[in-house]
């Protein structure tokens, strides 16, 4: 698992997501959704979407079967239906790695 300083992402309606650690299949994120829920360290897992929905970061449509990250906590958290498109996350992480490489 790779630990980041913190990769902030912004969603709709004031949603803030910070990637704290990541691997190919797992994320540890901070999820801050004003007025609804706040998870300081929440584990998300990569899987295929079981239903259609919308990416919490990009607002892009997600189709059933698309690669996504979803909360993996039990019991189901308040944001259990949230999804982040794996493609969106991969682009954000690649951009972060490039930025660090150029700064070095």
Image (tube, rainbow, N blue to C red):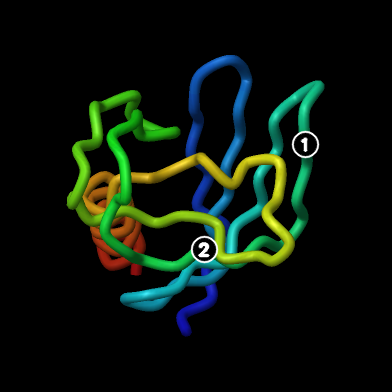
Residue 35: x and y in percent read: 81, 21
Write down the quadrant of residue 26 in the picture.
bottom left
Q: Residue at x 58, y 15 (%)?
A: 13
Q: Residue at x 63, y 41 (%)?
A: 79
| Outermost residue, top side | 13
Is residue 5 in sight in this rendering?
no
Q: Secondary structure at mark 2?
A: strand
* Residue matched to label 2: 44
Which tag, 1 or 2, sits closer to the chain's start? 1
Tell me the CA gap for discs 1 and 2: 16 Å
Is residue 71 in sight in this rendering?
yes
Q: Residues within 10 Å of mark 2 (few under 14, many from 20)?
A: many
Name the one closer to the observer, 42 or 80: 80
Write down the quadrant of residue 43 in the picture.
bottom right
Name the one closer to the observer, 91 or 24: 24
- Indicate left or right for 12 with 47 as reference: right
* Residue matched to label 1: 37
Q: Secondary structure at mark 1?
A: strand
């Amino acid at each position: 698992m790779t630990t980041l300083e913190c990769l902030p992402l912004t969603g709709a309606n004031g949603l803030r997501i910070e990637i704290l650690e990541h691997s190919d299949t797992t994320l540890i994120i901070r999820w801050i959704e004003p007025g609804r829920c706040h998870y300081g360290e929440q584990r998300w897992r990569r899987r295929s979407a079981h239903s259609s929905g919308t990416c919490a970061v990009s607002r892009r449509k997600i189709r059933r079967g698309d690669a996504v990250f979803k909360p993996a906590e039990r019991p189901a958290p308040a944001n259990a239906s949230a999804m982040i498109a794996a493609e969106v996350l991969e682009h954000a992480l690649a951009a972060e790695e490039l930025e660090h490489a150029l700064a070095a």
